[in-house]
Amino acid sequence: MAIRIYVPCDTTALSLGADEVARQIQQAADDRGQSITLVRNGSRGLCWLEPLVEVDTGQGRIAYGPVEPDDVSALIEAGLLEARRDHESCLGNIEDHPYLKRQQRLTFARIGLTDPLSIDDYRDHGGFQGLARAVELSGQAIVDQVKESGLRGRGGAAFPTSIKWQTVLDQPDDQQKYIVCNADEGDSGSFADRLVMECDPYLLIEGMVIAGLAVGADQGFIYLREEYPVAHRILDEAIARAEAEGYLGADVRGTGQSFYLEVRLAAGAYICGEETSLLESLEGKRGLVRAKPPLPAIHGLFGQPTIVNNVLSLATVPFILAQGASAYADVGMGRSRGTLPIQLAGNIRQGGLIELGFGVTLREILEDFGSGTLSGRPMKAVQVGGPLMAYLPESQWDTPMDYEAFAGLGAGIGHGGVVVFDDTVDMGAQARFAMEFCAVESCGKCTPCRIGSVRGVEVIDRIRAGERPEENLALLEDLCETMVDGSLCAMGGMTPFPVQSVMKHFPDDLTG
Amino acid sequence: MATPTEYPLPTEGAEGEWNEDSIRQEVNALRHKPGALLPILHAIQDRIGYIPEGAVAVIAEALQQTRAEIHGVISFYHHFRTRPAGTHVLQICRAEACQSMGCRALESHIQQRLGIGFHQTTHDREFTLEPVYCLGNCACAPSIRLDDRILGRMTPEKFDLLAEQLTTSTLEVQ
Ligand SMILES: Cc1cc2nc3c(=O)[nH]c(=O)nc-3n(C[C@H](O)[C@H](O)[C@H](O)COP(=O)(O)O)c2cc1C
Ligand code: SF4
Ligand code: FES
Ligand code: FES
């Protein structure tokens, strides 16, 4: 067979020169009169090895990484085109890599293997089997499967997905219903939604079509963050191709049911990741948070019954339908069923996507997968779950990744992002940033959030400048309580968590 | 930090040029969509580089909303601008994962090198600098975005090289 060479096309690989790497490899092959098939695959989520080049001569995919543009000519000399293994950046057969071998990739089973836009690749690797099963089932039977799987929303709140679906299904059928995918992925440290959309876009499309069939919705929207131009391009193209093959449109796979799907671009407001703010934004308004009730499942987009789910929640559904609810529910711990796609980021040697059953400890992630900090210095603090979550000191790293265990610490898992800081971090500055971020991103509806965050920055500045520290620390504690108690949504209501965690676990950094 | 640069008005033939017809085209192509306002604003900004004041009345009329409502939406979202930007929009990620890898130092380096702060444009109108909070490239931090290209593991040295390349290539085009 002709040699196949894979160079990923996701944002991370591109951000390190993957296009130029691909161009140079093709050029070198042409110069040598060697025929190769160059495939632009998705990323396997081994981010620290990107761009990760794989060469398949018929004996497995031999990987090299990281391969930046300046490395290509030396690698060609060392026999990359023949998959020779003596170069120091050769990683051997990538399927045997411990970082991948130790994972339980259910949702992410396909990423990196395929050309993200090839529907044939998708089908050849088990794609659309969940949909095939769903078209044989009643709406209620689909919702029952989701219920039995124990799936909880992966966007942050961990709310049981089936309850939302059931509520929308139970609304009268003569109403317009909507499926809205929350692809605003605003939390720092999170990139699993992006990986789904860029590396396996048909998976999200399949999940949304199944949701539509389940509850009788014929229109879906993907609310995509503007900061993701690559995902935007790939999703638009995938939707067009899926429509051309009858997976979307007037008659989904001969069911007689229609499902239309459209990407809507956000415009750079963190609060629009909150589901009611997101709906306002989709309606063409300022993203002001709505009071709940009414629930979006009853009065959602344009006042109609609406499912709002995170990308990962929707992308998990095809597995559940294809393999059966218990195949998913059998993994995990306690009330956290199935797998958690963890995203390891920040100051870490081996950052990337780690999908594992709930229950793995944070320390295993940091040490066994991450291999310590990139700077080589000791780790000092870890923020799990995005900017509204606590900073965890080392004494808390043995906690299992489980929604309830993290809640017990006054922390959370959120969307599964893990951001690592070494001992040069100034935790006082991190506390200040939490307040600053809230001041920049508050929707402005409640005073404790809008004004409190601005005051929070000022008070922290005074504490850090050594101005009456005791008095100001008491003021800061008061302010945090007011924000927690008096805010409509988690933006104002949880911004105090990282601040309070610094006051509690890293007090010396604050008073400095 | 450098003093704020006034945004000079676009001269004739500059990329910021627009007329009511071009706005109307974008509006008419999208006004039938439910929740059409954000798609319309994106289309106008993609075409003209910003949302000119004169567009507001056209949009308001087409969507049967007040101008104040349209203004309110434009001002709510960080992405929409009402003044022309430089040739390149440069965003520096300021969020936590990039902080852990030194994005604050990178930020000061870039601001010093370009002589501007956030939301400002260089005198030669080459760069407009904006903050951004996460580009989804958090495992290869720090990251910046240059127009639609995201660049990871950025360093002051890599940035200087990039800025030089960009400035020379624009000179060649002229
Ligand atoms: C300030 C704020 C920001 C949020 N950002 C996101 C986001 O970027 N993506 C997301 O899926 N959910 C986000 N959420 C959670 C959503 O409100 C909502 O819980 C989620 O979309 C529901 O989907 P799920 O049940 O599938 O998790 C955010 C919530 C808040 C309060
Ligand atoms: S807490 Fe903040 S972001 Fe949330 S509704 Fe109130 S003002 Fe808006
Ligand atoms: S609504 Fe007024 S303070 Fe929250
Ligand atoms: S925090 Fe900078 S890219 Fe995510």
Image (tube, coloured by chain):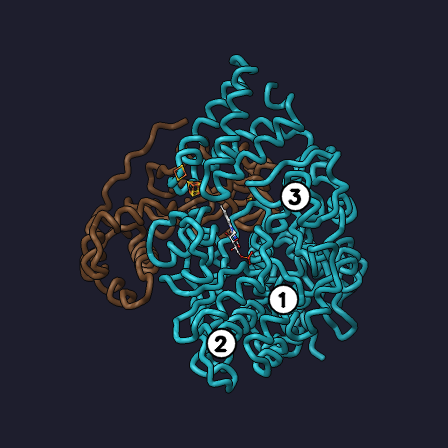
- Residue type highlighted by circle 2: Arg
Q: What residue does disc 3 label?
A: A407
Tell which tag, 2 or 3, sits nearer the viewer.
3
Q: Position of residue A384 (x, y in %)?
A: 64, 43
**Letter of the cyan chain:** A
Q: Position of residue A74 (x, y in %)?
A: 70, 56
- In this view, the residue in front, A473 or A186, is A473
- The reply to whether the residue tagged 2 has its Cβ within 8 angstroms of ligand 1 is no
Q: Earlier in the sequence, mark 1 or mark 3?
A: 1
Q: What is the chain letter for disc 1?
A: A
Query: In which quarter of the view is residue B59 placed?
Result: bottom left
Q: What residue does disc 1 label?
A: A147
**Letter of the brown chain:** B
Q: Earlier in the sequence, mark 2 or mark 3?
A: 2
How many marks overall? 3
Mark 3, secondary structure of its residue? helix
* B107 horizontally vs A160: left or right: left
Q: Position of residue A317 (x, y in %)?
A: 61, 68
Question: What residue is drawn where x is 55% and y is 60%?
Answer: A311
Mark 1, secondary structure of its residue? helix
* B42 horizontally vs B162: left or right: left
Q: What residue does disc 2 label?
A: A241
